[in-house]
């Protein structure tokens, strides 16, 4: 049967061989993501490409490609009318081992499609800052596993990219020199390309042995030979990110950490979310019920939100009563900081007051107008907050002449301890940095997992969180310019950039904080 079908609209079953790319999940093609979103079953190497399953529907059948009958099951599923995606490393038709699986579909008269992927041969070079070719317009890709004689490839003056050669890299270098390639020819060896584990050694054919001795290079990797390697120093952009490869602990609730995680990834970090706080409804809902009723009936002049969780709690109560943002009409609304203001805007409410200086209860009080009986018809403020909130805001507003209804909108309770390997990494220095976004995240992390190792960089959102961290014996290295998670991540990136610049200025290879602990593997 022809493989001409191009959509999952075909009435019969279907197998799509989709190139998953070289490692960075962001390099999956749009076509690949679309096919995954509509698949009934996915066959893949779960260890390498399991993260791509986020594109799939809930309940999709997942088959590990390592299973002996994986190919047969894919064909059988397609014959039964199901839509199957077979994820392949790199590009399915570029040094791939799935050719036999494609042939099996053709023989079984099952419709199939081949979706090209981004091959390591070009992607890894781009991520290493190496152009495919410079003055010599030749680009050659070879598989070391099937090369017996390197003389033909040594004669090429262009860029030579070698797959499956990491284990024999030094021997390949010697063979190229013996076959006539100058020993001064630049060469780069890159492993785990396009991922935050990427590591590249730039050297020459003549110096490969000493320069690779302690590098610990492993597959998947590439060897790149040619003058184009010399451009790496100027064009490297991925491995020079300020937090490249840093393992960063994000001790927050899942709902709160999504934007922060993406920002950290943009700096090259490897964020790991460890919930330390579980947000739960108040034990008795009557207080919130009365507050919402008062809000609707005009009891309050102001509503002050001190967290995005407070916004979420009020929003959920509104939905419970069939209300929406229009219930805030005639009220003044305050937000303690940028994240809280964003949550309000998403709800359809534009805050009237957000601190321009310090984004905290103190900063909010500093800009809050005093009560004026001539201007303010009502002197009451609603404060929907956490059960463990500090009294700073209440005391400050009371001093300004306002009456406060301090209402428990949600409870923050300590989350369950993380798995043992995570606890060991926290205490043993396996994390490069920890971000603390509140005093409670400090207390709860130490309570459920132990105190971070002294090589770990401690970054905090503000003075109160810094004080709590110091009370637990932690050295604070970074404090955000403003009390927002975005500023906190940016502050950590700036700190990482300074560490990198200092190492380079001293003629040293930049190292992550975790690599400075006793027993950490050294790369020279």
Image: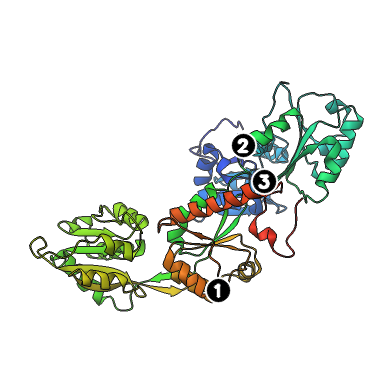
Callout 3: few (<14), some (14-19), or many (20+) C-alpha neighbours within 10 Å?
few
Report which residue position mark 3 lands on. Answer: 504
Pick the residue in front: 143 or 248. 248
Report which residue position mark 1 lands on. Answer: 473
Disc 3 element: helix
Residue 243 visible to an observer of this rendering: no
Residue 5 visible to an observer of this rendering: yes
Cα–Cα gap, marks 2 and 3: 36 Å
Residue 209: x %, y % from top left: 86, 43
Disc 2 element: loop
Callout 1: few (<14), some (14-19), or many (20+) C-alpha neighbours within 10 Å?
few
Pick the residue in front: 74 or 25. 25
Residue 246 to residue 371: above or below: above
Pick the residue in front: 88 or 170. 170
The residue lying at 68 percent from left, 35 percent from top is 232
The mark that comes first in sequence, 2 or 3, is 2
Report which residue position mark 2 lands on. Answer: 117
Q: Quadrant of the N terminus?
A: top right
Q: Is residue 235 left or right of residue 164?
A: left
Cα–Cα gap, marks 1 and 2: 49 Å
Cα–Cα gap, marks 1 and 3: 31 Å
The mark that comes first in sequence, 1 or 3, is 1
The residue lying at 62 percent from left, 36 percent from top is 118
Residues at badges 1 and 3 in contact (C-beta under 8 Å)? no
Nearer to us: label 1 or label 2: 1
């Amino acid at each position: 049967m022809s493989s001409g079908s191009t959509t999952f609209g075909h009435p019969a079953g279907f197998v799509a061989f989709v190139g998953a790319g070289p490692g960075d999940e962001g390099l999956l093609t749009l076509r690949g993501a679309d096919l995954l979103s509509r698949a009934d079953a996915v066959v893949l190497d779960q260890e390498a490409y399991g993260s791509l399953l986020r594109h799939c529907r809930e309940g999709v059948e997942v088959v590990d490609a390592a299973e002996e009958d994986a190919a047969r099951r894919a064909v059988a599923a397609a014959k039964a009318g199901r839509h199957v995606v077979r994820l392949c490393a790199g590009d399915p038709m570029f040094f791939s081992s799935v050719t036999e699986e494609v042939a099996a579909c053709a023989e079984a008269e099952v419709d199939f499609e081949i979706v090209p992927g981004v091959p390591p041969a070009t992607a890894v070079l781009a991520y290493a800052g190496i152009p495919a070719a410079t003055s010599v317009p030749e680009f050659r890709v070879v598989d070391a596993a099937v090369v017996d004689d390197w003389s033909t490839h040594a004669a090429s003056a262009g860029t030579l990219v070698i797959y499956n050669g990491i284990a024999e890299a030094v021997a390949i270098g010697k063979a190229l020199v013996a076959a006539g390639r100058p020993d001064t020819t630049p060469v780069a060896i890159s492993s785990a390309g396009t991922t935050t584990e990427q590591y590249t050694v730039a050297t020459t054919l003549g110096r490969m042995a000493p320069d690779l001795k302690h590098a610990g290079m492993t597959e998947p990797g590439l060897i790149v030979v040619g003058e184009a390697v010399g451009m790496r120093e100027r064009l490297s952009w991925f491995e020079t990110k300020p937090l490249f490869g840093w393992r960063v602990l994000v001790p927050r609730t899942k709902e709160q950490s999504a934007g922060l995680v993406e920002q950290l990834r943009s700096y090259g970090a490897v964020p790991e979310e460890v919930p330390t706080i579980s947000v739960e409804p108040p034990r008795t809902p009557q207080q919130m019920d009365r507050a919402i009723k008062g809000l609707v009936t005009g009891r309050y002049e102001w509503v002050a939100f001190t967290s995005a969780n407070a916004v979420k709690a009020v929003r959920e109560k509104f939905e419970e009563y069939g209300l929406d943002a229009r219930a805030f009409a005639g009220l003044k609304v305050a937000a303690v900081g940028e994240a809280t203001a964003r949550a309000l805007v998403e709800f359809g409410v534009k805050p009237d007051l957000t601190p321009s200086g310090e984004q905290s209860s103190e900063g909010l009080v500093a800009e809050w107008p005093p009560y004026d009986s001539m201007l303010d018809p009502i002197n009451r403020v609603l404060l929907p907050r956490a059960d463990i909130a500090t009294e700073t805001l209440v005391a400050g507003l009371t001093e300004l002449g306002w009456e406060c209804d301090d209402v428990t909108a949600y409870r923050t309770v300590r989350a369950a301890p993380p798995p043992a390997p995570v606890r060991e990494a926290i205490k043993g220095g396996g994390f490069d940095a920890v971000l603390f976004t509140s005093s409670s995240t400090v207390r709860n992390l130490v309570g459920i997992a132990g105190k971070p190792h002294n090589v770990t960089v401690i970054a905090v959102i503000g003075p109160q969180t810094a004080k709590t961290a110091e009370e637990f014996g932690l050295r604070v290295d970074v404090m955000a310019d403003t009390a927002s998670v975005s500023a906190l991540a940016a502050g950590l990136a700036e700190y990482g950039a300074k560490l990198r610049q200092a190492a380079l200025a001293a003629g040293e290879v930049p190292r992550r904080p975790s690599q400075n602990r006793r027993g950490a593997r050294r790369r020279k």
